[in-house]
Image (spheres, rainbow, N blue to C red):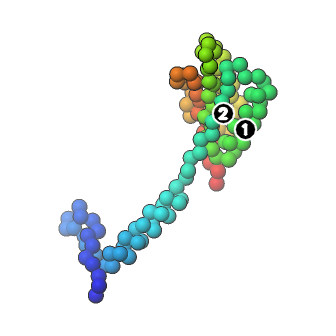
Amino acid sequence: MELDLVEISPNADPPVCKVIDYQKFLYQQKKKQKEMKAKSVKIVVKEIRFGPHTDEHDYQFKLKHAQRFLDEGAKVKAFVFFKGRTIVYKEDGEVLLLRFAQDLEEFGKVEQLPKLEGKRMTIMVSPKNAKK
């Protein structure tokens, strides 16, 4: 009949087998995996870079971009980059990031508080409601 004996679950007692067309079985499995992959949500992370002495206008400009990113359903990773001797102003960078998180409170929630990693202090904000 041009059919194959395929073992479906080998761990069951007794093992379960089916008489089916093996090529068709493989095709259907691939099709299911492809559908699952297509339905999975892709997480986008947008980065916004600040300096420790970012001016008010620049801050507002970047804040609007972050709000738009969060509305689109992307995560926002904001960081303060300390160049050379500006590492002395760690407190200013932390205050800037905390203010940024507070201003974005209605658009997203803080996933990670300001954390210093080498010359960068980072914060992660994820959207409150994912894009549908």
Residue occupied by mark 2: 48
Residue 6 sits above or below residue 127 on the image: below
Residue occupied by mark 1: 65
Q: Of all residues shown, which one is farthest toward the left?
A: 14
Closer to the chain start, of discs 2 and 1, is 2
Q: Residue at x 45, y 68 (%)?
A: 31
Q: Residue at x 38, y 76 (%)?
A: 24
Q: Residue at x 71, y 30 (%)?
A: 103
Relative to the observer, which residue lies in front, 117 or 36? 117
Res. 20 image quadrant: bottom left
Residue 31 placement, left or right of 11: right
Q: Of all residues shown, which one is farthest toward the front?
A: 84
Mark 2 residue element: strand
Query: Horizontal and vertical percent for residue 50?
Result: 67, 26
Mark 2 closeness class: few <14, some 14–19, many ≥20 residues within 10 Å: some
Kind of residue at disc 2:
Ile
Whether tag 2 and tag 1 are in contact, CB under 8 A, the answer is yes
Q: Quadrant of the N terminus?
A: bottom left
Distance from Cα at disc 2 to Cα at disc 1: 9 Å
Residue 64 in view in this figure: yes
Residue 8 placement, left or right of 124: left
Query: Horizontal and vertical percent for residue 39?
Result: 53, 59
Q: Which mark is residue 51?
A: none
